[in-house]
Amino acid sequence: MNLKKLAGVLALLYGATVWAGEPFVVKDIRVEGIQRTEAGTVFSYLPLKVGDTVSDERATAALRALFATGFFKDVQLLNDQGILVVRVQERPTIASVELNGIKDFPKPQLLENLKFVGLAEGRIFDKAMLEKSEQELKRQYIARGKYAVVVTTTVTELERNRVAVKLDVVEGSPSKIRQINLVGNAHYSESDLLDEMKLTTPGWFTWMTNNDQYSKPKLTADMEAIRSLYLNSGYMDFSIDSTQVSISADKKDIYITLNLSEGEQYTVSDVKVAGGKGVFSHEALRAMIAIQPEQTFSREALTAASDKIREEMGDKGYAFANISAIPDIDKEKHQVAFTFMVDPMQRAYVRRINVTGNDKTRDEVVRREFRQMESGWFSTSKIKKSKQRIDRLGFFAEVNVETQPVTGSNDQLDLNLHVEEKPTGNFQIGAGFSNAEGVTLSAGVTQSNLFGTGNALSTQINTSKVNQVYSVSYTNPYYTDDGISRGFDVYKRRTDATTTSVSQYTSDTYGGGVRLGVPIKEDETFQYGLSLEDTTLALTSESPQRYIDYINTFGTHSQNVLGTIGWTLDTRDSAIYATEGATQRAFLEAALPASDQRFYKFTYIQQWFQPLNQYLTLRLNGDLGIAGGYDGMVLPFFKNLYAGGTGSVRGYDSNSLGPRDSSGYTLGGEKRVVGNIELLFPVPGMEKTKSVRMSAFLDGGAVYGGQTQSPASEGMRYAAGLGINWFSPAGPMQFSWAKPLNQQPQDKVQSFQFTLGGFF
């Protein structure tokens, strides 16, 4: 092909022209038409230089190289008496990108996404790139179920070879799932299978969850949920043969069809164990497997058995144990036998424990909670306990532990602990409202991880009508290396019951003390304390006779030396979002013989968590208290036990339950019993969020003892309601609404209560 024919071909292919003539030797090269592009840039891409001979092949290669840069929309090669003239027409640059009609997404996020396909200010404009940008925008909306989205682009030419790009978006309404069809199911009804799926047709709560909008990842997860249901019910041959997703012509309605093949239900004929000797006997391994012959096959039970053996092996140091359940399937009898092959592999020990993410908290604060030691044999139970203890510190939003084999070694691994810090300082504001008392306020400031040391410093300011508290507390949880804690408290407490439902009196107490905590087991601790208190009392004209008699006998001023002893057992899996485990606390406070008074107060508090399924947790709370005098003295009335309100029996005013005087004021008592039953569950649509959950509760409680002029005020009171706990970015928030179930005319009701705070 000669140069004349080449010119015609290239003109058709590229819209470019070349000279017509014979091959020639390049004496010089001149670039024409460039505005933004440097001449050196053109030379760097041009595969020709002075002294080269321009032929048909080399001219074609030069044109292709220059067009491939994407900088030019037209290129001409000309021969000017041996000078190679490269005449170009540059593509325009993008001067601006404008998005209109965007509501569902932040514009900066979309502009950032468009950069990845080349649409951004300062980039070279290309129509192909513009089409990709349109498709990217549509993809973003389709992912949110808006199939009717329309994107219109406008390109406006500007001076200096620039263009302005505008994309107008009509988002439209999300397409809704109008029907989900299941074909081939016989063992489970369609409603049973639809209950396993997150995707659903429009309903009462779908506006919140968006589960009525089609999403391919959601459908994949739903298909796996259905598959798991069948496999856990013995249907080993179950399969989903096909899925069809169709959309209506107006792109408003989506129809989903799943075609299922159930197969036959299988039972387990036999379970055997092979290998593993030297660590566990076959009998011990078989005891770890809950599967029994004649049971219906369950993939979940099979996985649980393998995990149990692996966990027990790991607890002995065999971190790399290989557990395989080999099936022997009899399709005619619809039975399956399993042989668990157990290969312990090499026993491993932990080389290093690497801690990351603790930007504020010191390493030692995290490491002292570890029960798995470096250079010690690997132990799954110790690692689990270590994670639990770190999680219960309350310093971290996430705690993750991963094992990493050491390269070049078959008996070593590293533990990588990654934590995500969260604010550990908080101020808290509490409020309650009742028709009788109006609004009561309280506030406090706490830093539970002072300067990253793990030490706690807290101050409290409570301005409620009943209790005004000003206190400072400091606790070092590791005063000794053995985990003995030490704390100090200084406080001023004023009780003013003259404007509340509590019997009329005021007290001013100044005090201070020291505390020690002595761990006796992993989750069990004894506490000891000694403090001094100075109390001054005052009565009003409405104070009951029993208060007047007490003042006449013991006076208005007293000084007491208080000794305390406590016991705590805490097996919760988390201090913030507990789903299993329990806490028990027993606490005894007594005025020692050197005091002006002789009394004691004993309380026992129990909290128990039991997961019911993946999302529901049952919580049971119990609070028992008993108090009295000794050595011939009575319990001071300002040390009485009370119940009612937040943390007790919701739905009733704070401290309002129990005996009353002749004026109807609450006296408190010497015995208290409180119980709570709560069903904890996530907010619909936020199942994976551990910062918020709701509860339905039933509370009950009563206070007994003391002299009462209103017998009808005694006895148990009950209330039921709903609550929500939210660890929001602004701080912890608690809301509750309760309805008394057996309210008496003299009871004080406080239906709505809330507390809120902020982190720092």
Image: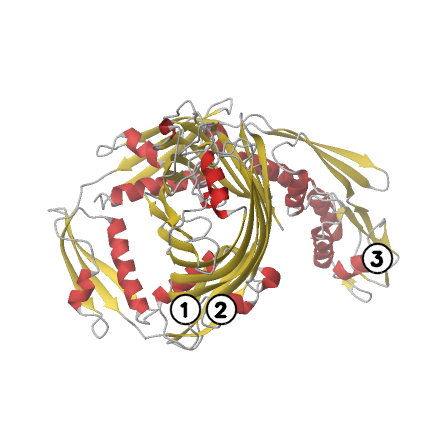
The secondary element bearing badge 2 is classed as: helix
CA separation, marks 2 and 1? 9 Å
Residue ID for mark 3? 39
**Above or below, comparing residue 455 to residue 86 in the picture:** below
The label shown at residue 198 is: none
Q: Nearer the viewer, residue 326 or 668?
A: 668
In the picture, measured across the screen, residue 748 lies left or right of residue 262, that is right
Extreme residue in the right direction: 81
Q: Which image quadrant for residue 566?
A: bottom left
Q: Percent position (x, y) of residue 36?
A: 83, 50
Across and down, in percent, residue 554 comes to 49, 47
Cα distance, mark 1 to mark 3? Answer: 68 Å
Choose the circle earlier in sequence order: 2 or 3: 3
Q: Looking at the image, which residue is at 32% across and 39% down? A: 226
User: Does any portion of residue 427 appear in the rendered image?
Assistant: no
Q: Secondary structure at mark 3?
A: helix
Image point 46% across, 29% down: which residue? Answer: 206
> Amino acid under label 2?
Arg
Amino acid type, mark 3: Ala
Read off the residue under disc 1: 371
Disc assigned to residue 367: 2
| Residue 38 seen in the figure | yes
The answer for how far apart the CA atoms under marks 2 and 3 are is 62 Å
Compared across the picture, whether 450 is left or right of 249 comes to: right
